[in-house]
Image (cartoon, rainbow, N blue to C red):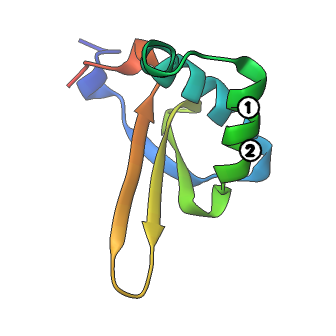
Amino acid sequence: MSGEPSDLAWTLRPATHADRDFAFELNRATMKEYVEATWGWDDAEQEALFDESFDPSDCEIIRIGSTDIGLLAVEESADEIYLAGIYLLPEWQSRG
């Protein structure tokens, strides 16, 4: 059936500083429940923490067609490649 997740091709594109707002809203959508349960969620504090650590050079935006649906964060050093996170908007999760 057309439009099913298996029929839609996903791609990656390099993240840029222009993706900051998308990346923060993605962080809020995927992590707020867990942060709130553990430490409490304060928007200003969370934005400040996010801005301290957001480095678009370590990120790629996950796309379905022309729609940004998530973020892949990978940190590379001389000795290792570290998968820092895979984040998908809730409406794109659990689709196989």
Residue 31 % position (x, y): 48, 24
Q: Would you identify the image quadrant in which residue 42 lies? A: top right
Residue 8 % position (x, y): 35, 29
Q: Amino acid at mark 2?
A: Asp
Q: Quadrant of the C terminus?
A: top left
Q: Which residue is mark 2?
A: 51
Depth check: give the residue in front, 13 or 83.
83
Q: Are marks 2 and 1 in contact (CB under 8 Å)?
A: yes
The correct choice, above or below, for 61 with respect to 84 in the image is above
Label drawn at residue 96: none
Depth check: give the residue in front, 86 or 12.
86
Q: Amino acid at mark 1?
A: Glu
Label drawn at residue 47: 1
What's the distance in space between the residues labelled 2 and 1, CA to CA?
Answer: 6 Å
Would residue 16 be found to the left or right of residue 29 on screen? Answer: right
Within 10 Å of disc 1 (Cα), the crowding (few <14, some 14-19, many 20+) is some
